[in-house]
Amino acid sequence: MYRIPLLLVLLLFIAVDASAQAQERRTDIEVAFADSPVPAAPIYSDTTNWCSLPNKNDLSDLIPKGADLEDRQADADVDVFYIHPTTLLQGDEWNADVNNKELNDRTDRLPIKYQSTVFNGSCKIYAPRYRQAHVRSFFNVDEGGREALMIAYSDVKRAFEYYLEHYNNGRPFIIASHSQGTLHASFLLRDLVEGKPLQDQLVAAYIIGFPIRDTTFKVLQPCSNPSETGCFISYGTYAEGYYPEYYETFLNGAIMVNPISWSMDTTAVSHHVQKGYVGRRFAKPRAKTFGARIKDNMLWVSKPHMFMGSLLKMKDFHIADYNLFWMDIRENVALRCKTYLDKSSQTNNTKP
């Protein structure tokens, strides 16, 4: 029997949501940055200023329906500090108010649910709310965008410092992010982690959906195999053969790690190897659907191998960077955590 509903789930997840975001996204300037009030900075001792904490009942605790998986945060030995992408797509403000309930609900229902949950099998999840910059900031950098992004980063940095002081207790951690979150994660890794004692606690960084180049870091290197630790993973997902109009100015030179093979090899990886994507219904991951290969500083994905998959017309899979490889990432996180913990145990056992 043909499984048409599965294709519809995929189309709903990608095409409909992308269309909605495109309609909502306005990049022109209605209010100058100087005339836009800056919301009060969040206080991270207040747990309401965190999207996710291990001891909170939040959407990062979810498991896809029907999946034989568990939320293992309670006994996890590794933390993840997750920085969500842009969800401020409407309005005239340049920076979000962390008390905006509607925006917080959107953040929780989308990236927290569909992205941060990938880590709950191996990590305790810490995800701060922050005064994220409006999406227009990326299109109007010199007209206030730079200042708005720096306000957002100042929150992320303070949240991470609060996490280190009050939650970390010397535990190993992962830095994870998407899109705007990855821009802030790159600053965070550069300012507080790489080349410093804290780097020894870094299991890996999953910094996805924003270009990372060989000039971004001085010490940190991209991961070259599935179990390597102390490295970073970055990629941006597009349809096979597609070059976006902003390729030369934005993507050219970006570092790519294939989230199926977990290497920088440009050889195409078959859909037969893929562990599974999660669609809009947040149901059991479906494996063996997408192949992927690195091409010209992009990650190209094949048409989905399912009935009528050839009808999928989406070219830019940015919103699906995590979802398309949800199970691949989840299993890889478990492997890197185990590798790191095994190495730490061996080191501790050989100390005099």
Image (cartoon, helix red, strand yellow):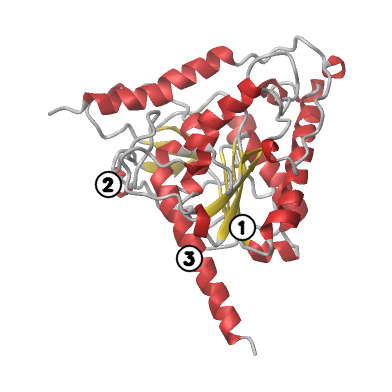
Q: Quadrant of the C terminus?
A: bottom right
Residue 226 seen in render:
no
* Quadrant of residue 26 within the rendered picture: top right
Give the crowd class for mark 1: few <14, some 14-19, many >=20 residues within 10 Å.
many
Circles 3 and 2, Cβ within 8 Å, touching? The answer is no
The residue furthest right is: 34
Q: Amino acid at mark 1?
A: Phe
Residues packed near mark 3 inside 10 Å, few (<14), some (14 to 19) or many (20 plus): some
Q: Secondary structure at mark 2?
A: helix
Residue 246, position in %: x, y? 59, 26
Distance from Cα at disc 3 to Cα at disc 2: 25 Å
> What number is the disc on residue 56?
none
65 w.r.t. 172: above or below:
above
Query: SS at mark 3?
Result: helix
Which of the two discs, 3 and 2, labels the residue nearer the N terminus?
Answer: 2
Judged left or right of residue 188, residue 305 is: left
Give the residue pinned by disc 1: 173
The image shows residue 146 at horizontal and vertical percentages of 79, 29
Q: Residue furthest bottom?
A: 352
Kind of residue sitting beneath label 3? Lys
**Which element is circle 1 on?**
strand
Mark 2 surroundings within 10 Å by alpha-carbon count, few (fewer than 14), some (14 through 19), many (20 or more)? few
The numbered mark, 2 or 1, whose residue comes first in the sequence reads 1
Q: Quadrant of the N terminus?
A: top left
Judging depth in this view, the residue of 243 and 163 nearest the camera is 163
Give the residue number, with chain letter if any, for mark 2: 272
Which circle marks residue 338 in the picture? 3
